[in-house]
Amino acid sequence: MTHIILDSGPVITHSLNGILWLFDTVKDHFGITFSITESVKHEIIDHPLAGKRFKLEAMQVMQLMRKGTIDVLDDPRIDEMTKEMLALANSCYFARGKPLQLVHYAEMSAIAAFLLRKADVVMIDERTTRYLFENPDKLRHVLEHKLHTKIDLDKATLLKLRKMAKGIAFTRSAEFAAVCFEKKLLDPLLPKIPKAKENLLDALLWAIKLNGCAISNKDLETLARLVQK
Amino acid sequence: METIVRQDILELLKEALKLLSEENPNVNELKNLSNRTVHNASIFQDEDSISFAILMYSLSKVIERAGEYVDYDKLIASLSCAAKALEKDQGLQYRVCTAATFDIVRSTDGTYKQYIQDVMMQAAVKKGSAVYAHGISAARTAELLGISLWELQSYLSATEVPEDDVDATSVRQRLALTRRLFE
C-alpha cells in the first residue's frame, strides 16, 4: 500500500485551491494513504484555529483527519530523529561565519516520518528542504545569489544528514495533481469549452503554483507537455 | 546584536529620520528602507532586522493612508531615541524605543485602528515573502515573522516570487516517480 507523508505546504495548497477532496478520491480509488506529523498538524490546524482567517480551511482539513484520509503520526521516535536532523540541517550552510537556520522542525519531521515509517514519498512544495537533500550545491548557489554573500558548506555535516536520509524521495502538489489529472480524477471539473482538457490542466497547474508550490514557469510548461491528456 | 546588523539599522534609521522630517515624507523611500534589512533578516534571522523591516513598511502605509493623523514629533523623538541607543550599542534600549515607535503607530487615530492592525500583519507577510525568496524555507520564514504558513502561502499567490529556472530534480523524473505511486 502506497504511503505518502504530507508536509504542511501541499495540504495548504490543495485547500486554498478547493481540491482537498483529491486526497479522499485518491485514497478511495488507489488505496494510497496519507499521513502528517504532529508538528505539521500544529502548523495547518492548531495555528489557524486560534485565529479568524483560515479557520474554516483548518476545519475542512480536520474533516479529512476524522474520515481517516489523513492520519496523524504520533510517534516519539519521529521527534527524536527530527531534532537530530534539524540540528544537522541548520548547521550545513554558513554565511558570514554564522550557520543559516534554513529549515523548520515541521519540515524535518516529515522527512523523519518518511524514514521511520518507510513511506514511499514525502510531498513537499517548498524548495529549500527539497534542494537540501536533492541538490545541496544548487541550494548553495541559490543562497549566494539571493543573499549576495559567500556561503560556506560544511560537507561533513551535510554528508551525515544525507546518509541519515538515504532513499528519500520527494514529490510536489504539481506532479501529484498532474497524475490525478491523467487518471481522470478531475474530469468532473471539465468545462464545456473548447480544448477543455488543456484548459483544465493549465488552470490546475497554475493555481497550484500560485498558491505556494515552488515550480518555475519553465518546469510548469514542461510538466504540462509531459502530462497525458 | 551583530555589529553589521546594528550598523545597517543605524544607517537606515538616520535615513528614516531625514525622510520623516520633510513636510511630505516620501512613503516610497520609506518602503525601500524596509527592504534593505531583508538580507540581514535572512542571514542572522534576528528580531531586530525583522522588526525594523516591518516597522518601516507599516509606517509607510500608515502615512500614505492616514498621514494627517500621525504624530510626527513623537515618531521622530522615538526613532531618534532608537538611533542614539544603537550609537551607544545599547541593544535593550534600542528595543524599548522601537516598541514605543510601534505603539505610536498603533495609537494613530482610532478610526484607523483596524487598518493599522491589518497593515502590520501585511507588513509581516510581505517581508516574509522576501525572506522566503532569499532561500529560507517556508515554514521557517513563517515562524520568524510570527505569521502562519497559510498567510504566507496565500500571499505568494498575489505576488511574483523570483524563481529558479529549473528544480533540483527534473520534472520528468519527478513525474515518473509520482506515476509509480498510483500503480
Image (cartoon, grey):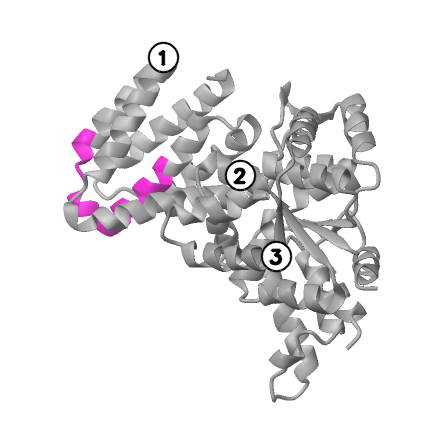
Instruction: In this rendered view, identify the residue nearer to me: A55 or A160.
Output: A55
Q: Residues within 10 Å of mark 2 (few under 14, many from 20)?
A: many
Which residue is located at x 40 percent, y 29 percent? B12
Type of amino acid at the residue the image marks with label 1: Gln
Type of amino acid at the residue the image marks with label 2: Thr
Which residue is located at x 29 percent, y 45 percent? B117
Residue B52 forms part of the magenta stretch: no
**N-term mark: 2 or 1:** 1
As measured in the structure, the alpha-carbon distance from the residue carrying label 2 to the one carrying label 1 is 27 Å
Would residue A63 be found to the left or right of residue A51 on screen?
right
| Residue at image mark 2 | B141
Tally of numbered discs: 3
| Residue at image mark 3 | A68
Residue A95: x and y in percent read 64, 25
Viewer-nearest of discs 2 and 1: 2
Give the magenta range. Answer: B55-74
Q: Chain of mark 3?
A: A
Instruction: Name which quarter of the figure residue B180 lies in.
Output: bottom right
Residue A226: x and y in percent read 80, 68
Are callouts 2 and 3 both on one chain? no
Identify the element where label 3 is drawn.
loop
Identify the element where label 2 is drawn.
helix
Q: Is residue B126 visible?
A: no
Instruction: In this rendered view, identify the residue nearer to me: A58 or A103.
Output: A58
Q: Is residue A143 above or below residue A154?
A: below
Q: Residues within 10 Å of mark 3 (few under 14, many from 20)?
A: some
Instruction: In this rendered view, identify the residue nearer to me: B60 or A12.
Output: A12
Which residue is located at x 31 percent, y 16 percent? B93
Residue A87: x and y in percent read 66, 24
Viewer-nearest of discs 2 and 3: 3
| Residue at image mark 1 | B90
Instruction: Name which quarter of the figure residue B55 lies in.
Output: top left
